[in-house]
Image (tube, grey):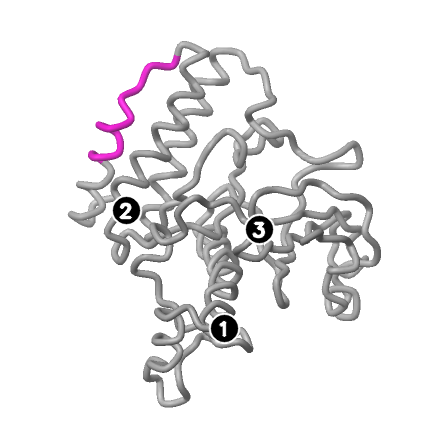
Amino acid sequence: MSVTESDIPEVFFNDGWITAVEYLVSSGKEGTVFCCRAAEPTGLDRLAVKIHRGRNFRSFKNDAIYLSGRAMGVSLSGSAGVKSSGMPDRRLERAVAKRTRRGKAAIEHSWINHEFNTLQVLHAAGARVPRPFTMSGHAVLMEYLGDEHGPAPMLKHVSLERRQAVEMFTGLIDEITLWLACERIHGDLSPFNILYWQDQAMVIDFPQAVNPRDNPDSLFLLERDIRNVAMYFEQYGVAADPVRIARDLWLKFMRGTL
């Protein structure tokens, strides 16, 4: 499925968020991002629109590990997926389990809604993630990380001094700790979804984030995230024990002392 600027929801224009599409930022494994000119009332120069790709076009090798424990009650209208009585929609849950057409549509909406909700929670807590503004259909409108010269580069493509590397590694562990305190684990963290912007690391791509209270693979995913970060910073002489860091954080999380 090829995503183009024509797939950007009209509501983003009609509601006074954006006025024009400037350029394609990236087309990744689970979404395509466009840089858009922000409407004057926003007080911003640019905003980013991320359009999620369908499951058949994403490259998550094992969606099940991320979906495990996730509340899948997401209605096709984008609401919370509970009946007006406040009770879970058991028919929708069965449709998801059987992967019917309705169930698959609910799963697709869950990725989008989940990323938007996660960004809301983390940004409100002070995490260095893009600020989310609104969503519609398969698209999320969020803060643009970059300027008139282009988007913020991936950490993978940045060269750091050792002092910067040490500070950035420490800062990323602090971020992971903050996410955990907010009951979120990124689950797919790597130098490809960490951006370098204004001398800081900003993290993107949260559709697969898991809730450590619900997902049985949470500790594994936490260790993998920290290992991926530690491996990248090894080139700068930053020595770390990702397993120890992850398990120390996990113990504090379980004790409620983060």
Q: Residue 85: x percent and y percent?
A: 36, 90
> Which residue is disc 3 drawn over?
57
Q: Which residue is mark 1?
A: 101
The residue that disc 2 covers is 218
Highlighted range, magenta: 238-248
- Give the side of residue 160 with respect to residue 114, left or right: right
Q: Residue 17: horizontal and vertical position, in percent?
A: 74, 62
**Is 69 placed above or below 160 here?**
below
The residue at 35%/67% (across/down) is 71
Q: Earlier in the sequence, mark 3 or mark 2?
A: 3
Q: Secondary structure at mark 3?
A: helix
CA separation in Å, label 1 and label 2: 29 Å
| Mark 3 residue crowding within 10 angstroms, few (<14) / some (14–19) / many (20+) | few
Q: How far, Cα to Cα, is label 3 from label 2?
A: 25 Å
Q: Quadrant of the C terminus?
A: top left
Please name the amino acid that badge 3 sits on. Answer: Phe
Residue type for callout 2 = Ser
- Residue found 74% across the figure and 46% down from its top: 35
Residue at 75% x, 43% y: name it: 24
Q: Image quadrant of residue 223?
A: top left
Residue 181 horizontal/vertical position (percent): 31, 48
Marks 2 and 3: in contact by CB < 8 Å? no
Which callout, 1 or 2, points to the residue nearer the camera?
1
How many residues crowd mark 1 within 10 Å: few (<14), some (14–19), many (20+)?
Answer: few
Judge whether residue 131 is colored magenta: no
Q: CA distance from mark 3 to mark 1?
A: 17 Å
Residue 178: quarter of image: top left
For the residue pair 2 and 41, the one nearer the viewer reads as 2
Residue situated in front as seen by the camera: 40 or 158: 158
